[in-house]
């Protein structure tokens, strides 16, 4: 087998792994969001994450004022934007962890199936 054939085979296998992971995550997302108690999980997380973004913006402004002595306006603007982004993203990630957990689990199961199938193709088991 030449090097180009090995590269093509590995790329095809990698593509198959990525596709199976995306399919598994998508199925898990649909399953979680179809449940009644989790139907508005993302909507609630979006609404409630603004509080953390505000706290992050205030903390970022404070750090921006204290860290940049020559041009405090630049430090405040950068601190507010960075603090708000970090606060919002971390709060959103925390509030949607049941969804992300299910998606990661679904992707892992699908990827494991593809890996097992690939291994069995390369190493067939002969009984008898």
Image: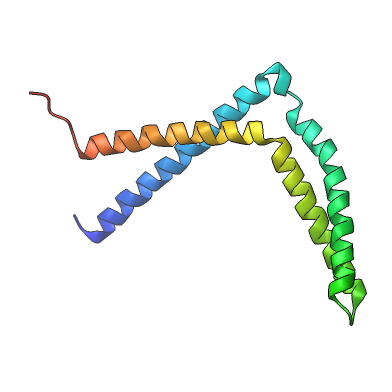
Residue at horizontal 52%, vertical 38%?
A: 22
Q: Quadrant of the N terminus?
A: bottom left
Q: Residue furthest top?
A: 36
Give the answer, above or below, for where 86 lies relative to 94.
below
Q: Residue furthest bottom?
A: 70
Give the answer, above or below, for where 34 lies relative to 44.
above
Q: Is residue 46 visible?
A: yes
93 vs 27, left or right, is: right
The spot of residue 39 in percent (x, y) is 73, 23
Residue at horizontal 79%, vertical 32%?
A: 43
The spot of residue 53 in percent (x, y) is 84, 49
The spot of residue 58 in percent (x, y) is 89, 57
Q: Is residue 23 visible?
A: no
| Residue 26, image quadrant | top right
| Residue 114, image quadrant | top left
Q: Quadrant of the C terminus?
A: top left
Residue at horizontal 79%, vertical 60%?
A: 82
The spot of residue 98 in percent (x, y) is 65, 31
Give the answer, above or below, for where 122 lies relative to 59.
above
């Amino acid at each position: 087998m030449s090097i180009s054939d090995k590269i093509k085979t590995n790329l095809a296998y990698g593509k198959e792994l990525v596709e199976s992971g995306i399919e598994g995550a998508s199925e898990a997302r649909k399953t979680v969001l179809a449940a009644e108690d989790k139907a508005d999980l993302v909507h609630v997380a979006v609404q409630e994450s603004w509080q953390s973004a505000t706290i992050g913006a205030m903390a970022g402004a404070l750090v921006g004022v204290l860290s940049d002595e020559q041009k405090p306006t630049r430090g405040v603007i950068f601190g507010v934007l960075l603090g708000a982004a970090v606060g919002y993203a971390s709060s959103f990630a925390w509030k949607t962890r049941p969804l992300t957990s299910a998606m990661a689990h679904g992707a892992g199961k699908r990827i494991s199936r593809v890996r097992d199938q690939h291994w069995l193709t390369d190493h067939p088991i002969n009984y008898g």
